[in-house]
Amino acid sequence: MRDRTSFLRPDLAQLAAYTPHPGGETPAIVDRLDTNESPLDLPTDIKSKLAWAYQEQIEANRYPDGSHQELKKAIAEYTTESANLNDSLNTDNISVGNGSDELIRSILIATCLGGNGSILVATPTFSMYAILAKTLGIPVVTIARDETDFSLDIAAAQQAIESTDNPPIKVVFVVHPNSPTGNVLADKELDWLKSLPENILVVVDEAYFEFSQTSIVGEIKQRNNWIILRTFSKAFRLAAHRVGYAIANPDIIRVLEKVRLPYNLPSFSQIAVSVVLQQRQLLLPLVQETIEERKRVYSVLQQNSHFQVWQSQANFLYLRLNNIDRNHQDSLLAKVTASLKAEGTLIRHTGGGLRITVGTPQESDRTLARLEKQVSLLINN
Ligand SMILES: *Cc1c(COP(=O)(O)O)cnc(C)c1O
């Protein structure tokens, strides 16, 4: 058959598109615990403020503010205050993206595009680094993690950096705490990242910072080759608005600003972020409730002998089935995930385990009951 798309890059034919909820749609989804969103929508009075802002402040016929100055100022204040930094961050330390996904892509464009570099990731981890790299034709070098605490295999990472050329590794992506496994960077991992030469960029994705309350932001001013990524999609409950930000030194920020699209952030999203930052005293206490709920769900899972569950510093938990080898594990977990989905519960099967978002107590209870039922059906058969 004649190839009617021969103008396309051949490597894209092999690439699978990112599917947020794989396996097709289910009629009535009740519990969406697969994407680590906040279980609660914004409070009604905040939504009313936003509706008013749309009515009164946004001129739909005008392009959004492409400089993001107000937004950057508010973000710089929030990041400075939340880390108790003496040396405050300024607007020239911040770049704002259409989700952190856009920032990841900008980083890849600014560093590795056109055969300039490869990236290093340690799996299991956030899948977008590798997916976006591949869409840009950027090679991805993958190393493993320790299967007990999910720390990076540092010897393998160092080996990869020393032996990869053509093109060499230019960016290392880590998540702090990691998704899907929930562990924060340990001291030995941080020491290794600090030991990397200045011609390698270190990206520390702190999407779950509000839950972990640990950050490397205090290091940024001393480190010209580090970038932090954060998002409003998780603790701030704004996943629908697609806003993320990068924190780094001005030299890096200037380049991220060059490669992004000029009007990357809709006016309504910019206003939404200003409002949630103003209202953070009202919104962020939910984080503490989520942490308490995470502890409760953890202890329920831990008491069930079928499961091995890991401590998490984020708003999700990661688990595997006890005493079952990797291949069998994956086929059982695929069945469990599909059965739960048929019942109306979405969880994520990834990296050889299950990642379950901490939802409301009702959502968690329903999910735990369904999970325990499906697993005992499978294991006892
Ligand atoms: C959820 C998540 C993000 C957020 O991405 P957005 O594009 O800002 O919604 C980024 N990194 C990690 C590791 C995540 O889990």
Image (tube, rainbow, N blue to C red):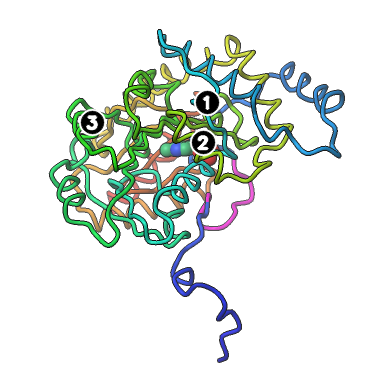
Disc 3 within 8 angstroms of ligand 1 (CB) = no
Name the residue tied to disc 1.
Answer: 92
Q: Which mark is residue 260?
A: none
Is most of the magenta stretch helix, strand or loop?
Answer: loop
Q: Quadrant of residue 177?
A: top left
Amino acid on which the number 2 mark rests in the picture: Arg
Identify the secondary structure beneath mark 3. Answer: helix
- Which amino acid type corresponds to the residue marked 1 in the rendered image? Asp
Q: Which residue is mark 2?
A: 254
Q: For the point 64% across and 50% down, which residue is it?
A: 27
- Label 2 to label 3, Cα distance in Å? 23 Å
Seen from the viewer's position, the closer of residues 207 and 376 is 207
Does dot 2 land on a helix, a strand or a loop? helix
x, y percent for residue 206? 41, 30
Where residue 194 is drawn, which disc sits there? 3
- 157, above or below 82, in the image: below
- Tell me the mark number nearer the camera, choosing from 2 and 3: 2
Q: Sequence order check: which comes first, mark 2 or mark 3?
A: 3
Q: Mark 2 and mark 3 in contact? Answer it, CB < 8 Å.
A: no
Magenta range is 20-29
Estimate the x, y position of residue 113 in percent, counting from the top left.
43, 56
Does 155 sit above or below residue 38? below
Identify which residue is drawn at 60% across, 11% down: 282
Nearer the observer, 275 or 165: 165
Q: Residue at x 40, y 49 (%)?
A: 111
Q: Which quarter of the picture shows residue 275?
A: top right
Q: Quadrant of residue 242?
A: top right
Q: Are marks 1 and 2 in contact (CB under 8 Å)?
A: yes
Badge 1, how many Cα within 10 Å: few under 14, some, many 20+? Answer: some
Question: Disc 1 and disc 2: Cα gap in Å?
Answer: 8 Å
